[in-house]
Amino acid sequence: MYPTELFVQLCGADKPDSAARTLAARWRARLRGGSLWPGSDPEPLTTDVLKTIGKLSGIVDYKFRAPLASEGEITPLIRGGFTVSVARSDCSNRARYTLAHEIGHTFFYDLNRKPPERLTPFSRSQTASDQVRSATRLEERFCDAFAAELLFPWEAAKLELETCTRIEDPSELLVFVEKASKRWGVSVELALRRLNQTYGVGANRDRVVSVMRWRPNSKTGRDPSVRVTQSFPRPSGDWFLPTNTRASSVGLSGASLLFDWWQRFDGRKAERSYRRSGVFNLKYESGKPTVLENEASPGAPCVESLLLWRRGPADARWRRVSVEAPVTYRFYAVNPTEAYSVALINLSRTYGCATCANPTGLTSSRQA
């Protein structure tokens, strides 16, 4: 069975996002109806509530702080049910997301079998057939959407993020999104995804938001570097930044600098004790980069020379163009090994050549 067929059987929708929203809403209604979750809706779900959902989904055992190569893993048991292993501690927000994601995988099994049997094909092998790899991508997309719906429901996100439609300043927008993510106990990355799904990426239509992580090429599994893992808006507006692209190849040098600083963290000034988690900004003074630790808001943007795709106004064709534009960076270190950077590109203020004067208040990332 292909995942879209399973979605139709489960809830009548054939799209992973729609199916995830419907099934997550059913779980919330089921918990309230059975007095298993006394909270009001909308309200963040605790780890204990997620464990209750997991128990009703066949999960009989949990292992937190597990030595995994990934964030989480679900394993069918011979006696029936599943064990779920999570790399983080059970009190962390990332563990809550991973737990919700792994619960999503239970929909793809026949729970009446011992051990549970898969209903749809799934494989992470690079040698798997195109159909199996496509099915795997659909399942992972569903599980991500299901986790988002459980932890930060669509209707709650619409209420929480409505103010973003009136925020023009990139730094102010990021601060607002950070506060929303903290209230709901989710990552800034998930809150940005929710913003894109509900209202786009804010009041400024000429804005691209990029999330970057240290990753190998998703197609080859080689060449690890700072790569674009998510790009908003989706669907694209007039500007487009492809995922899996190296940050350095599109001119987002600030992201590469932040990751380089983070990875060389241990080598900096042995006499000083550094924090390995937090929020960091990139500031340029006289063309030299400085990392600011745990600032309340992002610093001033810098001008970057970028290579982006732009839709032509006359023929609607996509063309790769070179532009100079202000970029606001923010770097989120979740733990000693996990970090990601967010770049807000303001394309309402573009400059067509490297000799253009910098706008007032902006500092260039290039050496003066």
Image: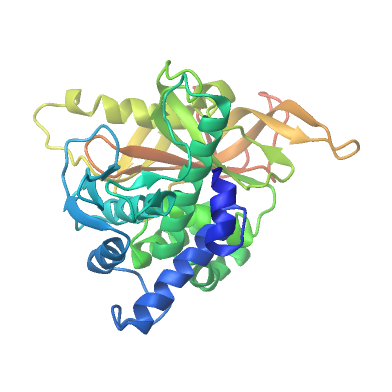
Choose top left, top right, bottom left or bottom right for residue 169.
bottom right
Could you say which is closer to the camera, residue 3 or residue 52? 3
Q: Residue at x 90, y 35 (%)?
A: 315
Q: Position of residue 204 (x, y in %)?
A: 66, 54
Q: Is residue 285 visible?
A: no
Q: Position of residue 66 (x, y in %)?
A: 17, 41
Q: Residue furthest front?
A: 113
Q: Position of residue 330 (x, y in %)?
A: 42, 44
Choose top left, top right, bottom left or bottom right for residue 36.
bottom left
What colour scheme does the image use? rainbow
Residue 87 drawn above or below residue 199:
above
Q: Residue at x 39, y 63 (%)?
A: 151
Q: Is residue 173 visible?
A: yes
Could you say which is closer to the camera, residue 280 or residue 237? 237
User: Which quadrant is the N terminus positioned in?
Assistant: top right
Q: How many marks?
A: 0
Q: Tell me if 292 is positioned left or right of 324 in this view.
A: left
Q: Tell me if 108 is positioned left or right of 234 in this view.
A: left
Residue 183 drawn above or below residue 140:
below
Q: Position of residue 245 (x, y in %)?
A: 54, 26
Q: Residue at x 91, y 38 (%)?
A: 314
Q: Tell me if 44 is positioned left or right of 315 in this view.
A: left
Q: Residue at x 26, y 52 (%)?
A: 95
